[in-house]
Amino acid sequence: MSHIALVTLVVRDYDEALSFYTGALGFELVEDTDRGGGTRWVVVRPRGTTGTGLLLARARDDAQLAAVGAQTGGRVGFFLHTEDFAGDHSRMVAAGVRFLEEPRHETYGSVAVFEDLYGNRWDLLQPA
């Protein structure tokens, strides 16, 4: 096995999730295929990368809907690496991304925790 290709993120609505991830975060849309019955195969990933992508999966029932935004129990569950922390942080703030703290400069790098549109916690991280 060489890598993890996709990680599923349960969302309320495909289009609102696409708007956030491609707009506010600047991800690229890799695939958006209609699978019939109101379902789609929607994959995004950070622009310019070929690594792991997010499969945006619309919640299909009450149990899945209850998990939207809480898939990691309130912990940071996603780590978005950058080579331009200050620039990406500023761009994301201007796009309305909600950061939960001011940027910190730790021994391992520059970091700030933010939430996606559903409340999932992410680290924006520029490794040292």
Image (tube, helix red, strand yellow):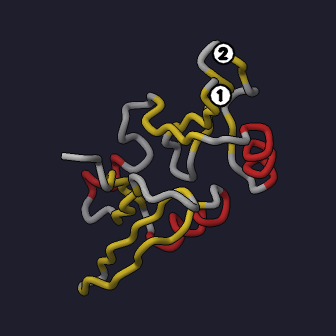
Is residue 33 placed above or below 2 in the rendered structure? below
Residue type of the residue flagged with mark 1: Val
User: Which residue is found at the position 69% from the left and 37% from the top?
Assistant: 99
- Looking at marks 1 and 2 on the same chain, the residue that comes earlier in the sequence is marked by 2
Q: Quick one: 79 or 47, which is closer to the camera? A: 47
Q: In the structure shown, which secondary structural element does the residue marked by tag 1 occupy?
A: strand
Indicate the quadrant where residue 95 lies: bottom right
User: Which residue is found at the position 73% from the left and 42% from the top?
Assistant: 84
User: Which residue is found at the position 18% from the left and 46% from the top?
Assistant: 1
Is residue 20 placed above or below 32 in the rendered structure? above
Say left or right for 21 vs 106: left
> What is the number of the mark on residue 106?
2
Is residue 52 placed above or below 55 in the rendered structure? above
User: Which residue is found at the position 34% from the left and 63% from the top?
Assistant: 57
Residue on which disc 1 sits: 111
Indicate the quadrant where residue 72 lies: top left
Is residue 114 placed above or below 106 in the rendered structure? below
Asked if the residues shown at circle 1 and circle 2 are in contact, with their CB atoms under 8 angstroms apart, the answer is yes
